[in-house]
């Protein structure tokens, strides 16, 4: 092939390309052609900070309701251990709720992608793994709530036992001088017991005194038997 023929072919190709590029109706005609391609769906933006904030609020309400069911307001607001334990429970439960929300969103997106025509076996494998992960999160959330409830019950019992021991210690507390400081109830009982013992002792002394006075010997001048015997003798002489 001569150089002149090559230049001619090159020139024809350049003219054809330039004509295609300068044709403004070419793109419109292509868009008008019907095809089986799936429609492009808009990307949904998710505010993950908002999801996390909602999860924290939900966890806080749940833990507060649980604590109020087993403990009093004073203990919840004043006891340092109870407040620290509540914060830990809120953080853990909020994390579980946030993971559940994000996993559910990923599952919905994956299902929509499969419905859009992505039928590769790998898509279904990922779908099964994601569903199993969601079930594990739900189980963990349920088990954690049960554990938190058992912890609140145990804490309530421990507080009752500690309060009872503290009350008993206050009632029977030994001061620095060695005297025993007892409660009002026990003090009154001891006083009543002492009074009863004194009354019983006095009664015994009175009974013993009466027995002594009855069994005491009579005087010779006041012997009633002798006087009576004398009267009888005088009557017999007459």
Image: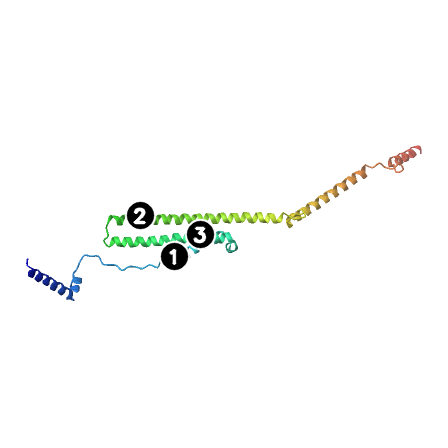
Pointers 1 and 3 in contact (CB under 8 A)?
Answer: no
Q: Quadrant of the N terminus?
A: bottom left
Distance Cα–Cα, label 2 vs label 3: 28 Å
| Picture disc at residue 52 | 1
Tell me if I can see residue 80 in this picture.
yes
- Position of 219 with respect to 126 (left or right) is right
**Residue ID for mark 3:** 89
Left/right of residue 131 with respect to residue 208 in the rendered view: left
Q: Which residue is mark 2?
A: 129
Instruction: Report x, y in % for residue 25.
Output: 15, 66
Q: Secondary structure at mark 3?
A: helix
Q: What is the crowding at mark 2: few (fewer than 14 residues within 10 Å), some, or many (at least 20)?
A: few
Packing grade of label 3 (10 A; few <14, some 14-19, many >=20) is: some
Q: Secondary structure at mark 1?
A: helix
Q: Earlier in the sequence, mark 2 or mark 3?
A: 3
Image coords of residue 191 (percent x, y): 69, 47
Real-space Cα distance between discs 1 and 2? 23 Å
Tell me the element at label 2: helix
């Amino acid at each position: 092939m001569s150089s002149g023929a090559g230049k001619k072919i090159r020139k024809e190709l350049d003219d054809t390309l330039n004509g295609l590029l300068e044709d403004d109706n070419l793109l419109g005609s292509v868009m008008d052609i019907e095809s089986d391609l799936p429609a492009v769906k808009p990307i949904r933006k998710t505010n993950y900070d908002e999801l996390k904030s909602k999860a924290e609020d939900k966890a806080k309400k749940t833990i507060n309701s649980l604590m109020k069911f087993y403990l009093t307001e004073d203990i919840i607001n004043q006891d340092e251990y109870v407040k620290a334990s509540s914060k830990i429970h809120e953080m853990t439960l909020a994390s579980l709720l946030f993971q559940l929300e994000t996993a559910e969103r990923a599952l919905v997106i994956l299902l929509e992608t499969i419905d859009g025509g992505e039928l590769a076996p790998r898509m279904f494998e990922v779908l099964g793994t994601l569903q199993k992960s969601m079930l594990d999160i739900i189980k963990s959330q349920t088990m954690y709530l049960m554990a938190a409830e058992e912890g609140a019950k145990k804490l309530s019992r421990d507080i009752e036992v500690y309060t009872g021991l503290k009350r008993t210690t206050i009632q029977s507390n030994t001061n620095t001088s060695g005297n025993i400081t007892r409660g009002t109830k026990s003090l009154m009982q001891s006083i009543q017991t002492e009074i009863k013992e004194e009354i019983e002792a006095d009664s015994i002394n009175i009974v013993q005194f009466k027995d002594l006075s009855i069994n005491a010997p009579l005087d010779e001048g006041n012997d009633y038997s002798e006087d009576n015997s004398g009267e009888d003798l005088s009557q017999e002489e007459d």
